[in-house]
Image (cartoon, coloured by chain):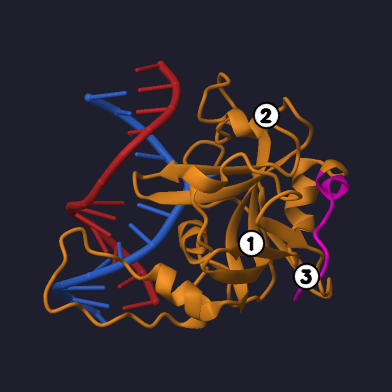
Chain colours: A orange, B red, C blue
DNA sequence: CTCGAGATGCCCT
DNA sequence: GGGCATCTCGAGC
Protein backbone atom coordinates (compact mmCIF):
# COMPACT_ATOMS: atom_id res chain seq x y z
CA UNK A 1 0.00 0.00 0.00
CA UNK A 2 2.59 2.54 1.01
CA UNK A 3 3.98 3.61 -2.30
CA UNK A 4 4.96 7.12 -3.30
CA UNK A 5 2.64 10.02 -3.74
CA UNK A 6 1.78 10.98 -7.25
CA UNK A 7 3.64 14.22 -8.03
CA UNK A 8 2.22 17.54 -9.12
CA UNK A 9 3.17 16.74 -12.71
CA UNK A 10 0.59 13.96 -12.77
CA UNK A 11 -2.22 16.45 -12.25
CA UNK A 12 -0.67 19.03 -14.56
CA UNK A 13 -0.06 16.83 -17.54
CA UNK A 14 -3.59 15.79 -18.45
CA UNK A 15 -6.69 17.66 -19.55
CA UNK A 16 -9.68 17.15 -17.25
CA UNK A 17 -11.37 14.34 -19.18
CA UNK A 18 -8.10 12.44 -19.48
CA UNK A 19 -7.35 12.95 -15.82
CA UNK A 20 -10.79 11.68 -14.84
CA UNK A 21 -9.96 8.45 -16.64
CA UNK A 22 -6.35 8.28 -15.42
CA UNK A 23 -7.53 8.58 -11.82
CA UNK A 24 -9.22 5.18 -12.12
CA UNK A 25 -7.05 2.60 -10.38
CA UNK A 26 -5.18 5.18 -8.32
CA UNK A 27 -5.31 4.79 -4.57
CA UNK A 28 -6.65 7.63 -2.45
CA UNK A 29 -4.98 7.71 0.98
CA UNK A 30 -5.81 9.74 4.07
CA UNK A 31 -3.31 9.67 6.92
CA UNK A 32 -5.51 11.08 9.65
CA UNK A 33 -4.88 11.33 13.40
CA UNK A 34 -7.39 8.50 13.86
CA UNK A 35 -5.54 6.22 11.46
CA UNK A 36 -4.98 5.50 7.81
CA UNK A 37 -7.78 4.79 5.39
CA UNK A 38 -7.41 4.20 1.69
CA UNK A 39 -9.24 2.98 -1.35
CA UNK A 40 -8.83 2.50 -5.07
CA UNK A 41 -10.68 5.04 -7.19
CA UNK A 42 -13.21 3.15 -9.31
CA UNK A 43 -15.59 5.91 -10.45
CA UNK A 44 -15.11 9.58 -11.39
CA UNK A 45 -16.90 12.46 -13.09
CA UNK A 46 -15.38 15.40 -14.94
CA UNK A 47 -16.68 18.96 -14.62
CA UNK A 48 -15.45 21.32 -17.30
CA UNK A 49 -15.40 25.07 -17.56
CA UNK A 50 -17.93 25.25 -20.40
CA UNK A 51 -20.29 22.79 -18.78
CA UNK A 52 -23.47 24.07 -17.11
CA UNK A 53 -23.19 21.48 -14.33
CA UNK A 54 -19.77 22.81 -13.32
CA UNK A 55 -19.61 25.03 -10.25
CA UNK A 56 -17.27 27.31 -12.17
CA UNK A 57 -19.67 27.68 -15.10
CA UNK A 58 -20.92 31.02 -13.82
CA UNK A 59 -19.05 33.73 -11.99
CA UNK A 60 -16.07 33.01 -9.82
CA UNK A 61 -17.37 32.96 -6.24
CA UNK A 62 -15.89 32.40 -2.77
CA UNK A 63 -17.13 28.82 -2.58
CA UNK A 64 -15.52 27.76 -5.84
CA UNK A 65 -12.25 29.56 -5.29
CA UNK A 66 -10.27 26.30 -4.78
CA UNK A 67 -11.31 25.22 -8.27
CA UNK A 68 -9.14 27.98 -9.65
CA UNK A 69 -6.06 26.73 -7.84
CA UNK A 70 -3.27 24.54 -9.16
CA UNK A 71 -4.17 21.12 -10.54
CA UNK A 72 -3.99 18.68 -7.64
CA UNK A 73 -5.79 21.05 -5.31
CA UNK A 74 -8.56 19.53 -3.18
CA UNK A 75 -12.04 21.01 -3.57
CA UNK A 76 -14.59 19.83 -1.00
CA UNK A 77 -18.05 21.33 -0.87
CA UNK A 78 -21.24 20.84 1.10
CA UNK A 79 -24.21 19.38 -0.77
CA UNK A 80 -27.82 19.10 0.38
CA UNK A 81 -26.87 20.68 3.66
CA UNK A 82 -25.41 17.50 5.09
CA UNK A 83 -23.12 15.69 2.71
CA UNK A 84 -19.83 16.65 1.14
CA UNK A 85 -18.22 15.92 -2.21
CA UNK A 86 -14.49 15.47 -2.83
CA UNK A 87 -12.98 16.82 -6.03
CA UNK A 88 -9.53 17.07 -7.54
CA UNK A 89 -8.83 20.32 -9.37
CA UNK A 90 -7.61 19.82 -12.93
CA UNK A 91 -6.52 21.60 -16.12
CA UNK A 92 -4.43 24.67 -15.19
CA UNK A 93 -4.74 27.27 -12.46
CA UNK A 94 -7.36 29.91 -13.14
CA UNK A 95 -9.62 27.79 -15.35
CA UNK A 96 -12.01 26.14 -12.88
CA UNK A 97 -12.27 22.46 -13.76
CA UNK A 98 -12.27 19.43 -11.47
CA UNK A 99 -12.90 15.71 -11.17
CA UNK A 100 -15.44 14.37 -8.68
CA UNK A 101 -14.52 11.10 -6.97
CA UNK A 102 -17.70 9.01 -6.83
CA UNK A 103 -16.64 5.63 -5.44
CA UNK A 104 -13.72 3.75 -3.90
CA UNK A 105 -12.81 0.14 -3.43
CA UNK A 106 -11.63 0.15 0.20
CA UNK A 107 -8.09 -1.14 0.78
CA UNK A 108 -7.10 -0.13 4.32
CA UNK A 109 -8.70 1.06 7.55
CA UNK A 110 -12.02 -0.66 6.95
CA UNK A 111 -12.85 -0.72 10.66
CA UNK A 112 -12.27 3.01 10.87
CA UNK A 113 -14.48 3.49 7.83
CA UNK A 114 -17.22 1.53 9.56
CA UNK A 115 -16.99 3.81 12.59
CA UNK A 116 -17.02 6.99 10.54
CA UNK A 117 -20.03 5.84 8.55
CA UNK A 118 -22.17 5.45 11.66
CA UNK A 119 -24.93 8.04 11.81
CA UNK A 120 -24.99 9.96 15.05
CA UNK A 121 -28.56 10.95 15.95
CA UNK A 122 -28.88 14.63 16.72
CA UNK A 123 -30.89 13.85 19.82
CA UNK A 124 -29.37 10.74 21.44
CA UNK A 125 -31.78 7.89 21.79
CA UNK A 126 -31.66 5.59 24.79
CA UNK A 127 -30.90 2.83 24.80
CA UNK A 128 -28.28 3.50 22.14
CA UNK A 129 -28.86 1.73 18.87
CA UNK A 130 -26.41 -1.01 18.03
CA UNK A 131 -23.83 -0.12 15.42
CA UNK A 132 -24.68 -0.80 11.86
CA UNK A 133 -22.47 -3.14 9.92
CA UNK A 134 -22.01 -1.96 6.35
CA UNK A 135 -21.11 -4.41 3.65
CA UNK A 136 -17.59 -3.61 2.43
CA UNK A 137 -18.89 -2.69 -1.00
CA UNK A 138 -21.24 -0.13 0.60
CA UNK A 139 -18.57 1.72 2.57
CA UNK A 140 -17.45 4.07 -0.21
CA UNK A 141 -20.14 3.56 -2.85
CA UNK A 142 -21.15 7.16 -3.56
CA UNK A 143 -19.51 10.57 -3.29
CA UNK A 144 -21.00 11.44 0.10
CA UNK A 145 -20.30 8.01 1.54
CA UNK A 146 -16.63 7.92 0.61
CA UNK A 147 -16.02 11.39 2.01
CA UNK A 148 -17.47 10.26 5.32
CA UNK A 149 -15.64 6.92 5.36
CA UNK A 150 -12.33 8.61 4.53
CA UNK A 151 -12.75 11.23 7.23
CA UNK A 152 -12.61 14.09 4.75
CA UNK A 153 -14.08 17.40 5.89
CA UNK A 154 -14.25 20.69 4.06
CA UNK A 155 -13.35 22.69 7.16
CA UNK A 156 -10.08 20.76 7.37
CA UNK A 157 -9.17 19.73 3.86
CA UNK A 158 -10.74 22.10 1.34
CA UNK A 159 -8.07 23.85 -0.74
CA UNK A 160 -5.24 21.60 0.47
CA UNK A 161 -2.93 20.02 -2.12
CA UNK A 162 -2.64 16.32 -2.83
CA UNK A 163 1.16 16.59 -2.93
CA UNK A 164 1.61 18.35 0.38
CA UNK A 165 -0.74 17.08 3.05
CA UNK A 166 -2.40 14.10 4.74
CA UNK A 167 -4.50 13.26 1.68
CA UNK A 168 -2.74 12.02 -1.43
CA UNK A 169 -2.84 9.57 -4.33
CA UNK A 170 -0.58 6.73 -5.36
CA UNK A 171 -0.19 5.28 -8.84
CA UNK A 172 -2.36 2.35 -9.96
CA UNK A 173 -1.13 -1.10 -8.97
CA UNK A 174 -2.59 -2.27 -12.23
CA UNK A 175 -4.22 -0.76 -15.28
CA UNK A 176 -5.52 -4.10 -16.42
CA UNK A 177 -9.16 -3.10 -16.57
CA UNK A 178 -11.65 -1.69 -19.03
CA UNK A 179 -13.22 1.73 -18.63
CA UNK A 180 -16.88 2.48 -19.20
CA UNK A 181 -18.00 6.01 -20.05
CA UNK A 182 -21.55 7.22 -19.41
CA UNK A 183 -23.48 10.36 -18.57
CA UNK A 184 -23.17 11.79 -15.08
CA UNK A 185 -25.42 11.04 -12.13
CA UNK A 186 -27.63 13.30 -10.07
CA UNK A 187 -27.55 16.42 -12.22
CA UNK A 188 -30.12 18.18 -14.37
CA UNK A 189 -28.16 20.59 -16.54
CA UNK A 190 -25.44 19.07 -18.69
CA UNK A 191 -26.97 15.67 -18.11
CA UNK A 192 -26.29 14.47 -21.66
CA UNK A 193 -22.52 14.91 -21.51
CA UNK A 194 -20.50 11.66 -21.36
CA UNK A 195 -18.25 12.73 -18.53
CA UNK A 196 -18.56 9.80 -16.12
CA UNK A 197 -15.85 7.14 -16.01
CA UNK A 198 -15.77 3.89 -14.11
CA UNK A 199 -13.99 0.56 -14.04
CA UNK A 200 -16.09 -1.91 -15.98
CA UNK A 201 -17.72 -4.64 -13.89
CA UNK A 202 -16.25 -3.33 -10.66
CA UNK A 203 -18.75 -4.05 -7.85
CA UNK A 204 -17.72 -0.96 -5.86
CA UNK A 205 -19.05 1.45 -8.50
CA UNK A 206 -22.12 3.37 -7.31
CA UNK A 207 -24.33 2.39 -10.26
CA UNK A 208 -23.39 -0.09 -12.92
C1' DC B 1 -34.61 -5.23 -5.13
C1' DT B 2 -37.32 -0.39 -6.11
C1' DC B 3 -39.68 3.63 -4.85
C1' DG B 4 -40.68 8.10 -2.51
C1' DA B 5 -40.10 11.36 1.04
C1' DG B 6 -37.56 14.07 4.13
C1' DA B 7 -33.41 15.86 6.07
C1' DT B 8 -30.70 20.25 6.29
C1' DG B 9 -27.15 24.36 5.36
C1' DC B 10 -25.21 27.25 2.40
C1' DC B 11 -24.55 29.77 -1.73
C1' DC B 12 -26.11 32.77 -5.13
C1' DT B 13 -30.01 35.27 -7.62
C1' DG C 1 -36.12 31.87 -1.51
C1' DG C 2 -34.71 28.27 -4.94
C1' DG C 3 -31.89 24.73 -5.74
C1' DC C 4 -28.59 21.68 -5.10
C1' DA C 5 -22.49 16.76 -8.36
C1' DT C 6 -26.82 12.90 -1.80
C1' DC C 7 -28.17 9.61 1.55
C1' DT C 8 -31.17 7.05 4.77
C1' DC C 9 -35.15 5.03 6.03
C1' DG C 10 -39.46 2.63 5.60
C1' DA C 11 -42.95 0.43 2.72
C1' DG C 12 -43.94 -2.64 -0.77
C1' DC C 13 -42.91 -6.08 -4.28
Q: Quadrant of the C terminus of chain A?
A: bottom right
Q: Is residue A6 on the magenta stretch?
A: yes
Tag in front: 1 or 2: 2
Task: Indicate the secondary structure of the residue bearing disc 3.
Answer: loop
Q: Kindly report which numbered mark, 3 or 2, lies closer to the viewer in this rendering.
A: 2
Residue A17 appears at what percent x and percent y?
75, 46
Q: Residue at x 56, y 18 (%)?
A: A59
Q: How far apart are marks 3 and 1 (CA)?
A: 12 Å
Q: What stretch is highlighted in magenta?
A: A1-11
Q: Position of residue A74 (x, y in %)?
A: 64, 44
- From the image, give the main secondary structure of the stretch colored magenta: loop
Q: Is residue A82 left or right of residue C9?
A: right
Res A103 seen here: yes
Which label belongs to residue A43? 1
- Say which mark, if any, is on residue A68: 2
Q: How crowded is mark 2: few (under 14 residues within 10 Å), some or many (20 or more)?
A: many
Q: Do labels 3 and 1 share a chain?
A: yes
Amino acid sequence: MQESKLPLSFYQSHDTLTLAEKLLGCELVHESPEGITSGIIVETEAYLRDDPACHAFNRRTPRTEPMYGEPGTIYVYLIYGMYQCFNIVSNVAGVGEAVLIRALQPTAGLDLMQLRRQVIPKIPVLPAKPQKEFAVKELCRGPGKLVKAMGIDRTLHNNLTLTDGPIYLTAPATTDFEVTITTRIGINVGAALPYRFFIKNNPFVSKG
